[in-house]
Image (cartoon, rainbow, N blue to C red):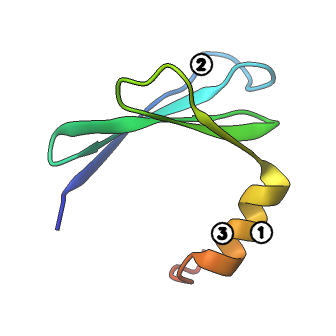
Amino acid sequence: MAKHTVTVDVPKRQITRADVKFQVKADGKMLGTLTVSKGAVVWFPFKTKYGYKMGWKKFNQIMTSEATRFEAR
């Protein structure tokens, strides 16, 4: 199983218009970057110019129907 590393680049101000970027690596190799904003999430696979964008409503539908229920907060 791959060992995943996730780093975050958070803006030094309140998140309003600035995106938060998560760099995701598997076994030390870059998988891509997840960009989170107040309007959507966008996944940019490594070495690609264009990403895959999904609004929060669609993200919620996919996560609640497809993801494994795992963790209590």
Q: In which quarter of the image is residue 19?
A: top right
Q: Mark 2 points at which residue?
A: 11
Is 21 above or below relative to 72?
above
Q: Marks 3 and 2, Cα distance to the nearest angstrom?
A: 26 Å
**Foreground residue, 3 or 10?**
3
Q: Is residue 19 left or right of residue 27?
A: right
Residue corresponding to mark 1: 61
Tell me if 29 is positioned left or right of 60 in this view: left
Q: How far apart are marks 1 and 3 (CA)?
A: 6 Å
Q: What residue type is labelled 3?
A: Met
Q: Earlier in the sequence, mark 2 or mark 1?
A: 2
Query: Foreground residue, 28 or 53?
Result: 53
Q: Position of residue 53 (x, y in %)?
A: 68, 39
Q: Where is residue 55 in the image (x, y as percent from the top left)?
A: 79, 46
Label 2 secondary element: loop
Assess disc 1: are there few (<14), some (14-19) or many (≥20) residues with their C-alpha within 10 Å of its C-alpha: few
User: What's the amino acid at mark 1?
Assistant: Gln
Disc 2 versus disc 1: distance between alpha carbons? 28 Å
For the question of whether residue 23 can be seen, the reply is: no
Q: Is residue 41 left or right of residue 25?
A: right
Point 79% across, 51% down: residue: 56
Task: Please tell me whether mark 2 or mark 1 is closer to you in this view.
Answer: 1
Q: Going 35% across and 23% down the picture, which residue do you hit?
A: 47
Q: Residue at x 15, y 48 (%)?
A: 27
Q: Residue tagged by mark 3? A: 63
Depicted 53 relative to depicted 58: above or below: above
Q: Give the amino acid type for the residue marked by disc 2 in the picture.
A: Pro
